[in-house]
Image (cartoon, rainbow, N blue to C red):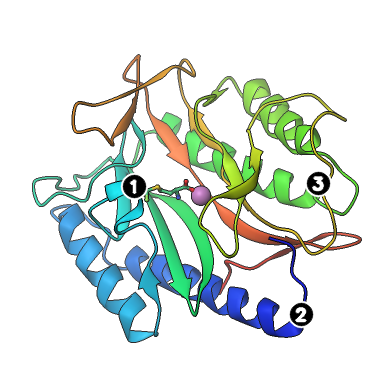
């Protein structure tokens, strides 16, 4: 969407604030022995208590509030009771909120206890890729400018960007125009306009970029079994910069 009033900006900011608060709250619960379903219940209760609704629940039949993706799982992991976090895992948590008809979307990858050097680097590189993408954004840049910045940085660190899933416009729907791939060429693609709201979400694999979907119909995993990380912010495009909406 393109924001057209202060009221709209306030509503979408509220949705995004609930997303950020949910991730911040979940951070305290992430430890060995905790199930993904437990995290899902904490998140759902919190979102409802803030007057929001879990945006993923029911989206194309998705059954839960969170996507909880562990280690080689890239995105869309189901928050199962049998999915128990263990020391050394990395866990990506994706959460969407609808508030008074407006959407916010965000994701964060957390270490569970102490993790390997490679896992730590993967998390740092993916977070930095998102930060670089956000700092590239202002009115007049292209979708390809965002993708190329993410791709060049990630590949320079020896990792790969997932090709099959992308960021997206957001606002009155969870997924809106334009798609925001995490790879691309400078100067190519749609031009960003002031007031656009975007969800930028690099998904980075330690090995090959190839992924596949498990038989549950949701969970996306790396083909080679390598680790994967995912960070996402919803942002507002401004004349000179981007405003991150999914921050506390
Ligand atoms: N955050 C995901 C995205 O940006 C949405 C998950 S889709 C769902 O596309 F179906 F799992 F809800
Ligand atoms: Co998203």
Q: Which residue is mark 2?
A: 5
Sequence-first disc among 3 and 1: 1
Looking at mark 1, is its residue's CB closer than 8 Å to ligand 1? yes
Examine the rendering and report whether any part of residue 3 can be seen.
yes
Looking at mark 2, is its residue's CB closer than 8 Å to ligand 2? no
Q: Are marks 3 and 2 in contact (CB under 8 Å)?
A: no
Residue visible at 31% across and 19% down in the picture: 225
Helix, strand or loop for disc 1:
helix
Query: In the image shown, does 183 or 35 lie closer to the viewer?
Result: 183
Helix, strand or loop for disc 3:
helix
Q: For marks 3 and 1, give the CA distance.
A: 32 Å
Residue visible at 80% across and 50% down in the picture: 137
- x and y percentages locating residue 117 in the rendered image: 43, 33
Return the mark for residue 222: none
> How many dots with numbers?
3
Sequence-first disc among 3 and 2: 2
Q: Is residue 150 above or below residue 17?
A: above
Which of the two discs, 3 and 2, sits closer to the camera?
2
Q: For marks 3 and 2, give the CA distance.
A: 24 Å
Residue visible at 44% across and 16% down in the picture: 210
Q: Which residue is mark 1?
A: 60
Return the mark for residue 136: 3
Q: Is residue 119 above or below residue 43?
A: above
**Figure quadrant of the C terminus:** bottom right
């Amino acid at each position: 969407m393109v924001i057209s009033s202060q009221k709209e900006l306030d509503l979408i900011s509220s949705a995004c604030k609930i997303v950020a608060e949910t991730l911040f709250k979940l951070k305290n619960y992430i430890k060995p022995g905790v199930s993904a379903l437990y995290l899902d219940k904490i998140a759902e209760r919190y979102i409802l208590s803030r007057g929001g609704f879990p945006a993923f629940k029911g989206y194309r039949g998705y059954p839960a509030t969170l996507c909880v993706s562990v280690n080689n799982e890239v995105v869309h992991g189901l928050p199962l009771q049998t999915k128990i976090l263990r020391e050394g895992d990395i866990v990506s948590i994706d959460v969407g909120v609808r508030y008074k008809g407006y959407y916010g979307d965000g994701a964060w990858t957390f270490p569970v206890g102490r993790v390997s050097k490679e896992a730590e680097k993967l998390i740092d590189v993916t977070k930095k890729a998102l930060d670089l993408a956000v700092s590239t954004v202002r009115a007049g840049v292209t979708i390809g400018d965002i993708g190329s910045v993410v791709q060049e940085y990630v590949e320079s660190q020896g990792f790969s960007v997932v090709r099959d899933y992308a960021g997206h416009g957001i606002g009155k729907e969870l997924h809106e125009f334009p798609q925001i791939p995490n790879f691309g060429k400078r100067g190519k693609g749609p031009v960003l306009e002031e007031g656009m709201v975007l969800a930028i979400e690099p998904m980075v694999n330690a090995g090959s970029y190839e992924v596949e979907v498990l038989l549950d119909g949701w969970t996306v995993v790396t083909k080679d079994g390598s680790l994967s990380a995912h960070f996402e912010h919803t942002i507002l495009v401004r004349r000179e910069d981007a405003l991150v909406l999914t921050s506390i």
